[in-house]
Amino acid sequence: MEEAKVNGFFISEKISRIRWVPEELKTSEKFITGSWGNSTNYVKCFKLVRNQFSEEANEFVPKCNSKVPFKGDITGLEFLDPDKIVVSSSDGTISILSLTRADIDTLSVKAKSNILHQYPTGVEASCTSISIFEKDIASVGEDGCLHVLSSNSLTPLRSIENADSCTITTCSFVNSNEILTGNRMGGVKIFDIRSEETFPQNTLYISCEDDKKSNYVSCLAFHPTQKHIIFAGSEEGSFTVWDLRQPNYPASYLSAHTSAITEIAFHKSQPTKLFTASENGELWQWTQNTLLMNTGIESQMSLNTDSENVNPWLNGERAKHKINVTSLFSGLKKSINTFDTVDSKIICGCDNESVYLIDSIL
């Protein structure tokens, strides 16, 4: 791997979510951002264009081509398909934006839900996280509610009003019928949305170094080729790994950052590479070793996806010796809230009102 190249761009707003725009047959040069902390926040579409003030032909800067205002903080941003974006807000609503492709792309509001999350007093509660599976959208909030909506109408197909007694911080579809939620108390719950019951199938708890300290679930992720392996980032900066086939105990617990993990995700085309970002301004890459010390040299193709013996994430303490950790970015002293990967590039959004493009990560 070449030495990673980092370029920073000041965009005058704190970024809560960032995603590359999906492209066919070419590497994306466009990305979408969502902001937070302002009286009016925006979802914006940027394109990387050549820096006319630089003598280097391969130096690019982001140019904003379109934006849509929101009254609340942007708390979630995911592509429903290449031209539709699902956005959640701290005002308790979900919107679908349309991306019209042209020489200058434009964003517009296609649909907006009613208030989905509110406290018993009627005050709006923040929608804290969203997850998408095909055409369905899962939404969780500070009111402890879980909703599954149809993207066609943004009306709930299934609602669990008391999914939790505290704030639900994050959610993720396991499959079309099951959803994971993480809460402020460090619990990860598995709900079967086909069931009429309102209680979870199972409840897991993240590990922590100090049981007396708060340690909420900050983010969730799945292994891209083994969906039964789940990852839960935490407030203390560690993450816990479970095998859903044997969920009674965590498979691994890895200490990582010294503050909350804000996002955890695998590379979209490289399943041996995991990335974590944190509130203390760090972005790390975790790479699975293809040279396993106990078996000699094994090729990437020899990693049997059905065997937990060769998957380092399920090896407990031994996992630490089968994973290489590289710091891609550190010393920012402001939270890196979000990131996204495409090919050899990763882009991240931060609380210092900047985005950073890191190239040559593979």
Image (cartoon, grey):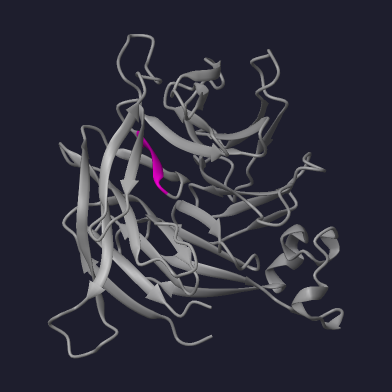
Tell me if residue 339 comes above or below residue 290 in the rendering: above
Left or right: where 198 falls relative to 105: right
Residue located 52% across and 75% down the image: 326
Residue 231 in the image: x percent, y percent?
Answer: 62, 50
Q: Position of residue 4 (x, y in %)?
A: 43, 81
Which residue appears at 73% of the width and 78% of the height?
Answer: 290
Residue drawn at point x = 59 percent, y = 42 percent: 211
Residue 85 lies in magenta, yes or no?
Answer: yes
Up-down relation of residue 164 to residue 136 (above or below): above
Among the 4 quarters of the image, the one containing residue 164: top right
Task: From this view, report whether residue 328 is shown above or below residue 155.
Answer: below
Drawn side of residue 247 relative to residue 66, left or right: right
The quarter in which the N terminus is drawn is: bottom right
Which picture quadrant has residue 57?
bottom left
Q: Which residue occupies the extreme top position in the image?
A: 121
Let me know if residue 38 is in the magenta part. Answer: no
Q: Which residues are magenta?
A: 83-88
- Extreme residue in the bottom direction: 55
Q: Is residue 266 visible?
A: yes
